[in-house]
Image (cartoon, rainbow, N blue to C red):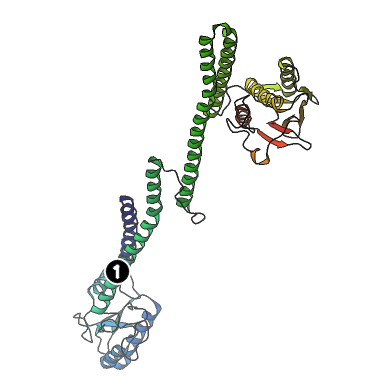
């Protein structure tokens, strides 16, 4: 058990102990207030009892009054002579006697205190004690349930030492239950946190495998564990992608470097062919420069997915300019580039990045579109998005590779040496940065369709 478990345990236990003390204190204060409350009965039954006592004393004398007082069960009527002696010799509770004296000293008429006149002119002071109610208790035969006669011996069930033992047992049981529930709650809360800590330690050591099974729905701690699994899976995919990218970059740089070394060696061995060697060196240098530039662009897009510039631009105008450049640079036998645009289609974004994305897709289509073919750039829009379809009539791509063409350094044809496989990857990052999307699909009759989708400018 860790420190967090004990923190949970102690906090829950202290909360339950505080609640127990609060509830017990409230009951104790209530009982104390009841014990200190007025013991003099001022209700209608007390008035009736006092009237009955006065009539009995008047017509039957002291013996009849003593008999009546001894037979009364529900009410306890005290009658004192002029010397303060109670007729039945019973002890008057101190609180009750003090309350009677206080009321007599006030000089106000009191219905709950009665002076009785005897046959010989003697005066007696009569008053009634408030009934002491104890719920659901029977004391002796003939006693009504719920009422115990004051002064009676309370030795039945629920009184005396047995009652104290029951109270202590209840307190002990409540304490044990509090300990049990505090331990269960602390274990419940600390268990997934300990598992999460172990997962963090494993991730710090390089192990990014998921570690949390599917938990109960709606449990925030299990949701946190699943979020950690998702994060670790994304980190592992990112690290695998970085390692694969480093391997691909090394492989791509090795080939032009090997050709450069071969061209330099040939220039040393055959000085008469130095011109062709220099041409080879120039081409390989340009190839490496282009590769480094594309890598820098891809790295910048991956590191900063946001846009530094946002301007309004017309996709139709952009497509016509890219098609014009492609026609100018195309050699003999290159596919013809045609643009089909219904009119201006305005979007918002970075002009340089969108130019690079569309140009990479068009050049890829011209490279694989076959000699003498046609590459079409078709623009159209719906209610929310602008779409640019780049269509060619090349060999197409295997259906299993359609989702992989946007991965860096992917080549649909392994023997292909022209290009580095970064153009479509750059285009995907550009479209994602603009809130759009890019997809590839094979065309009926052969060829490939690449669709670039961008949100329309409101």
Query: What is the quadrant of the N terminus in the image?
Result: bottom left
Q: In the picture provided, is 244 more to the left or to the right than 193?
A: right
Q: Which residue lies furthest to the top in this view?
A: 272
Between 311 and 92, the residue placed more toward the observer is 311
Residue 311 versus residue 243: which sits nearer the camera?
243
From the top left corner, tell me how far across and down residue 259 is, in percent: 54, 19
Dividing the picture into quadrants, the one containing residue 183 is bottom left
Question: Percent x, y for residue 229?
Answer: 47, 46
Q: Name the residue under label 1.
A: 171
In the picture, measured across the screen, residue 232 lies left or right of residue 197, that is: right
Where residue 383 appears, as percent x and y from the top left, is: 75, 35
Q: In the figure, residue 123 lies in which quadrant?
A: bottom left
The local secondary structure at tag 1 comes to helix
Q: Please, which residue is most extreme toward the left here? A: 83
Asked if residue 37 shows in the view, the reply is: no
Residue pictured at 50% horizontal, 44% vertical: 230
Can residue 367 be seen?
Answer: yes
**Which residue is at the front of the view, 256 or 200?**
256
Direction from residue 44 to residue 164 in the image, left or right: left
> Looking at the image, is 166 positioned above or below residue 286?
below
Above/below status of 256 relative to 212: above
Drawn side of residue 344 relative to residue 237, left or right: right
**Which residue occupies 35% across, 57% down?**
12
Identify whether 269 is placed above or below 439: above
- Quadrant placement of the C terminus: top right
- Percent of width and height locating residue 420: 59, 26
Q: Is residue 355 above or below residue 193?
A: above
Nearer to the camera, 169 or 161: 169
- Where residue 53 sits, quadrant-wise, is bottom left
Q: How many neighbours does mark 1 have within 10 angstroms: few (below 14), some (14-19), or many (20 or more)?
A: few
Residue at coordinates 58% horizontally, 30% vertically from top-left?
409
């Amino acid at each position: 058990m860790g420190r967090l478990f004990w923190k949970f345990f102690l906090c829950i236990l202290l909360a339950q102990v505080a609640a127990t003390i609060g509830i017990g204190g409230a009951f104790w204060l209530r009982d104390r207030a009841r014990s200190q409350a007025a013991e003099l009965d001022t209700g209608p039954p007390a008035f009736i009892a006092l009237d009955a006592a006065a009539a009995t004393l008047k017509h039957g004398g002291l013996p009849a009054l003593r008999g009546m007082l001894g037979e009364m069960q529900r009410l306890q009527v005290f009658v004192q002579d002029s010397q303060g002696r109670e007729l039945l010799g019973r002890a008057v509770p101190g609180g009750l006697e003090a309350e009677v004296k206080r009321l007599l000293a006030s000089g106000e008429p009191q219905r709950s205190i009665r002076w009785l006149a005897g046959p010989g002119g003697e005066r007696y002071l009569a008053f009634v004690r408030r009934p002491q109610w104890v719920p659901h208790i029977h004391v002796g035969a003939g006693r009504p349930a719920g009422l115990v006669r004051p002064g009676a011996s309370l030795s039945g069930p629920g009184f005396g030492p047995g009652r104290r033992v029951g109270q202590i047992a209840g307190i002990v049981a409540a304490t044990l239950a509090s300990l049990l529930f505090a331990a269960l709650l602390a274990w419940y809360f600390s268990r997934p946190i300990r598992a999460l800590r172990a997962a963090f330690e494993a991730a710090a050591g390089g192990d990014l495998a998921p570690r949390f099974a599917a938990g109960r729905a709606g449990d925030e701690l299990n949701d946190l564990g699943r979020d950690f699994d998702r994060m670790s899976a994304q980190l592992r995919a990112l690290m695998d992608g970085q390692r694969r990218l480093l391997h691909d970059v090394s492989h791509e740089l090795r080939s032009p470097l090997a050709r450069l070394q071969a061209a330099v060696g040939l220039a040393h061995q055959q000085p008469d062919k130095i011109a062709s060697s220099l041409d080879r060196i120039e081409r390989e240098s340009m190839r490496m420069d282009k590769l480094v530039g594309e890598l820098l662009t891809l790295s910048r897009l991956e590191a900063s997915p946001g846009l530094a510039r946002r301007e309004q631009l017309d996709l139709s105008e952009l497509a016509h300019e890219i098609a014009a450049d492609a026609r100018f640079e195309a050699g003999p036998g290159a596919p013809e580039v045609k643009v089909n645009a219904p009119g201006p289609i305005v979007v918002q974004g970075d002009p340089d990045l969108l130019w690079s994305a569309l140009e990479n897709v068009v050049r890829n289509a011209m490279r694989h579109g076959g000699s003498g073919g046609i590459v079409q750039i078709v623009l159209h829009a719906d209610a929310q998005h602008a779409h640019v379809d780049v269509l060619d009539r090349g060999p197409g791509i295997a259906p299993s590779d359609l989702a992989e063409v946007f991965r860096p350094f992917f080549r649909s044809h392994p023997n292909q040496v022209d290009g580095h496989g970064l153009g479509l990857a750059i285009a995907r990052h550009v479209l994602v940065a603009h809130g759009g999307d890019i997809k590839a699909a094979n065309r009926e009759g052969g060829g490939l369709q690449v669709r670039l989708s961008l949100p329309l400018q409101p």
